Image: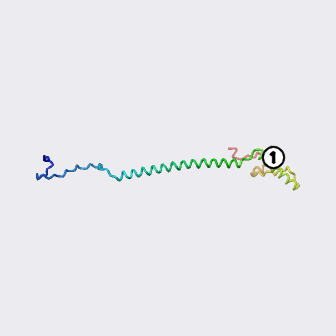
Amino acid sequence: MSDPIEHVGADQSGARAEPVAAPKKPGSHSKIAHLRPKVNYEKAQAETADARAELQAASSALRTAEKMEGSALADWIKLNPAPSADEVTRQFLAGQQATRAARVEQGLDPDTRAVPVISKSPIDQFAAARGKAASRGGTPLRSNVVRR
């Protein structure tokens, strides 16, 4: 059997002509499989699996460390208990008694307390100096801010 006519060269010599390639559409890709993308994809999958395993191991180690830290903190709290209300009251009263004893040794009245210094504005000082009688009959001391 011979080749059909369309595959025979123009000179009818019987030599096969090369098939004409179809024009390539813009944006199309070849259908030939390349090995490099597959290798890169498999390599990335292996790296991702390794990273995931490492993350899980680190998360497990973190949880273990947090539990150990909690138990260590609980043990430390057991070794250093907070003072009870009775102990705090006793310490306060002992401090007061020590202060009173020191004042008695100095020859002072043990119950005398220092007068607190309250800073007064000049208006308050002037009003205190006027006395009670001046405040009844005279002009009351008021700020103009109050009248607004």
Could you say which is closer to the camera, residue 104 or residue 98?
A: 98
Q: Residue furthest bottom?
A: 106
Could you say which is closer to the camera, residue 110 or residue 28?
A: 28
Q: Residue furthest front?
A: 1
| 84 displayed left or right of 61 | right
Q: Residue furthest left?
A: 12
Could you say which is closer to the camera, residue 139 or residue 47?
A: 47
| Residue drawn where x is 80% and y is 47% of the image | 90
Residue 72: give x, y in percent of width and height.
64, 49
Q: Which residue bears the numbered disc 1?
A: 134
Give the colouring mode of the picture.
rainbow
Quadrant in which the C terminus is drawn: top right
| Residue drawn where x is 25% and y is 50% of the image | 24
| Residue drawn where x is 58% and y is 48% of the image | 64
Could you tell me how many numbered marks the image carries? 1
Residue 28: give x, y in percent of width and height.
29, 48
> How many residues crowd around disc 1 within 10 Å: few (fewer than 14), some, or many (20 or more)?
few
Q: Secondary structure at mark 1?
A: helix
| 81 displayed left or right of 40 | right
Q: Amino acid at mark 1?
A: Ala
Residue 86: give x, y in percent of width and height.
78, 44
Residue 79: give x, y in percent of width and height.
70, 49
| 1 displayed left or right of 65 | left
Could you say which is closer to the camera, residue 111 or residue 81?
A: 81
